[in-house]
Amino acid sequence: MAKKAVASLQTGSKRLAKAIKMVKSPKTGAYVFIEKIMDPTKTKEFFSK
């Protein structure tokens, strides 16, 4: 069932990229990973924030 959902997502959508950014939490001081799936042209915008 999961394979069908992934296959239909890949054929019906544009090319996507997964961006992972490590950010330091201001409260605890620990590092947190932020993941987002987006269009490859918007990755520079995501990392500049």
Image (cartoon, helix red, strand yellow):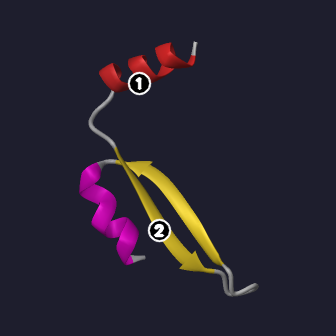
Q: Nearer the viewer, mark 2 or mark 1?
A: 2
Q: Please report the bounds of the magenta region as a residue range.
A: 40-48
Amino acid bearing label 1: Leu
Residue 10: quarter of image: top left
Q: Identify the mark at residue 9; answer none if there is no mark.
A: 1
Badge 1: residue crowd in 10 Å (few <14, some 14–19, many ≥20): few
Q: Main secondary structure of the magenta part?
A: helix
Are circles 2 and 1 on residues that touch, CB within 8 Å? no
Residue depicted at 75% across the width and 85% down the height: 28
Residue identifier under label 2: 21
Residue depicted at 69% across the width and 87% down the height: 29
Marks counted in the figure total 2
x, y (%) of residue 33?
57, 66
x, y (%) of residue 46?
39, 66
Q: Is residue 30 above or below residue 7?
A: below
22 within the magenta span: no
Q: Is residue 13 above or below residue 38?
A: above
Element class at badge 1: helix
x, y (%) of residue 45?
33, 68
* Mark sitting earlier along the chain (2/1): 1
**Residue at the right extreme?**
28
User: Where does the C terminus fall, quadrant-wise?
Assistant: bottom left
x, y (%) of residue 23?
55, 77
Residue 26: quarter of image: bottom right
Residue depicted at 46% across the width and 23% down the height: 6
